[in-house]
């Protein structure tokens, strides 16, 4: 997913988490090794053993500040077919973030062509460098030659080996307290998460066109929850009294402890309270979402581990969007109707 903040100034001071994928999702950067149950700081902890190309990509990333001193590299996690990195732009720049990433990618492309000459088509553009850039940039410093200039006539999206990285990148902006710590934890935990996904591929595959009544949904998680013998819709009025809410909470949790699957979009405060309590008790739930699920998307945070334990299914009847939206009354009615349909089948 290539996400941009429409009104954001990408030349200004900001911290970003960036994600880039290898074109064709080829595992060229290394392999993940280790044990899922190993302590985080042990020798057997999950980690990526970098290939030669992966090490050069690593060096290019950490070399960015040598060419752009306004940028500080905070973190990098290289995976076999993608990478996550965190950059801090300390002060206003003359170029924007996209220019920096294009330079990084250009440096990586150079290493890719050197290490895999048989996979890379020969460019049909002149080899004479632009007079505006060094003719022989240092291997550890990202080049400022733009991708469009150096590779515009090379195979791109439809030719799998034209570039090392797929076109574009995903960025997230640091906007809230505690967000950076969550990013760092996410990057550190990526190898462990990949090993878990490999152990349970069906629980992390996005299913498209899941038919429930009149709806065609996308879903990820334990699909078997849809056919559990007992499914209960959690629908709680906003005007419910505290006493009745406590009674309803215990009723639903008791049923879930006995094997029922709780189903809800968690719209009202009471629904959120009950579904949160069930989740915390590691009880099976179907969470309905007002946003769709992208084809390569996987649950994040604690939802990831709930999927790995087969106690969560995320289901949505809506198309996916990267934009944050406020749920509408119509969407609430749709999700409540979907929950009812799931539970009546």
Image (spheres, grey):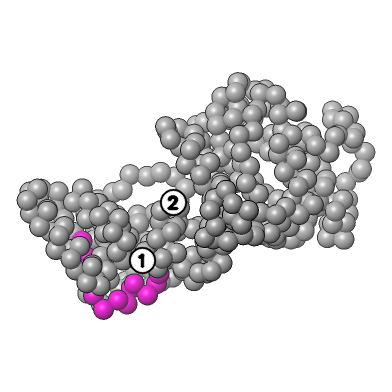
Q: Residue at x 60, y 23 (%)?
A: 90
Q: Can the viewer see residue 215?
A: yes
Considering the numbered disc 1 on the image, is that residue within a helix, a strand or a loop? loop
Q: Position of residue 137 (x, y in %)?
A: 86, 34
Separation of residues labelled 2 and 1 (CA atoms): 15 Å
Considering the numbered disc 2 on the image, is that residue within a helix, a strand or a loop? helix
Q: Is residue 231 magenta?
A: yes
Residue that badge 1 annotates: 311
Q: Quadrant of residue 86?
A: top right
- Disc 2 and disc 1 in contact, CB within 8 angstroms: no
Left or right, 267 with reference to 192: left
Q: Tell me if residue 344 comes above or below residue 330 in the rendering.
A: below
Mark number for residue 127? none
Q: Which residues are magenta?
A: 222-234
Left or right, 304 with reference to 60: left
Q: Residue at x 32, y 61 (%)?
A: 282
Q: Residue at x 71, y 36 (%)?
A: 62
Q: Tell me if residue 14 comes above or below residue 210 in the rendering.
A: above
* Neighbour tally class for label 2: few under 14, some 14-19, many 20 plus, Cα within 10 Å: few
Q: Is residue 122 magenta?
A: no
Q: Residue at x 85, y 34 (%)?
A: 138
Residue that badge 2 annotates: 301
Left or right, 156 with reference to 207: right
Q: Can the viewer see residue 1?
A: no
Q: Position of residue 11 (x, y in %)?
A: 61, 26
Q: Quadrant of the C terminus?
A: bottom left
* Neighbour tally class for label 1: few under 14, some 14-19, many 20 plus, Cα within 10 Å: many
In this rendering, the count of numbered labels is: 2
Residue lying at the far top of the rendered structure: 91
Q: Position of residue 24 (x, y in %)?
A: 68, 60
Q: Position of residue 336 (x, y in %)?
A: 24, 61
Mark 2 vs 1, N-terminal side = 2
């Amino acid at each position: 997913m290539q996400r941009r903040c429409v009104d954001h100034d990408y030349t200004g001071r900001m911290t970003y988490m960036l994600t880039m994928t290898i074109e064709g999702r080829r595992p060229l950067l290394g392999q993940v090794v280790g044990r899922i149950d190993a302590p985080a700081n042990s020798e057997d902890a999950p980690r990526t053993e970098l290939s030669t190309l992966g090490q050069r990509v690593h060096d290019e990333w950490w070399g960015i500040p040598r060419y752009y001193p306004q940028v500080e590299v905070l973190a990098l996690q290289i995976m076999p077919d993608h990478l996550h990195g965190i950059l801090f732009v300390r002060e206003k720049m003359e170029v924007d973030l996209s220019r920096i990433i294009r330079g990084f990618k250009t440096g990586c492309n150079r290493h890719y062509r050197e290490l895999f000459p048989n996979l890379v088509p020969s460019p049909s553009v002149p080899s004479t460098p632009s007079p505006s850039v060094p003719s022989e940039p240092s291997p550890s410093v990202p080049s400022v030659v733009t991708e469009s200039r150096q590779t515009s006539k090379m195979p791109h999206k439809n030719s799998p080996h034209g570039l090392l990285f797929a076109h574009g990148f995903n960025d997230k902006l640091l906007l809230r307290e505690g967000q950076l710590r969550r990013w760092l934890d996410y990057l550190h935990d990526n190898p462990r998460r990949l090993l878990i996904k490999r152990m349970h591929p069906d629980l992390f595959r996005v299913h498209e066109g899941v038919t429930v009544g009149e709806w065609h949904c996308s879903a990820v998680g334990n699909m078997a929850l849809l056919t559990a013998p007992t499914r209960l819709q959690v629908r709680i009025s906003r005007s419910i009294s505290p006493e009745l809410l406590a009674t309803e909470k215990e009723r639903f949790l008791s049923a879930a402890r006995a094997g029922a699957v709780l189903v809800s979009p968690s719209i009202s405060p009471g629904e959120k309270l009950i579904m949160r309590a069930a989740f915390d008790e590691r009880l099976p739930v179907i969470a309905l979402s007002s946003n769709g699920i992208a084809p390569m998307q996987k649950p994040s945070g604690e939802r990831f581990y709930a999927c790995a334990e087969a106690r969560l299914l995320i289901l949505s009847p809506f198309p996916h969007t990267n934009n944050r939206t406020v749920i509408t009354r119509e969407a609430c009615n749709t999700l409540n109707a979907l929950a009812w349909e799931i539970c009546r089948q």
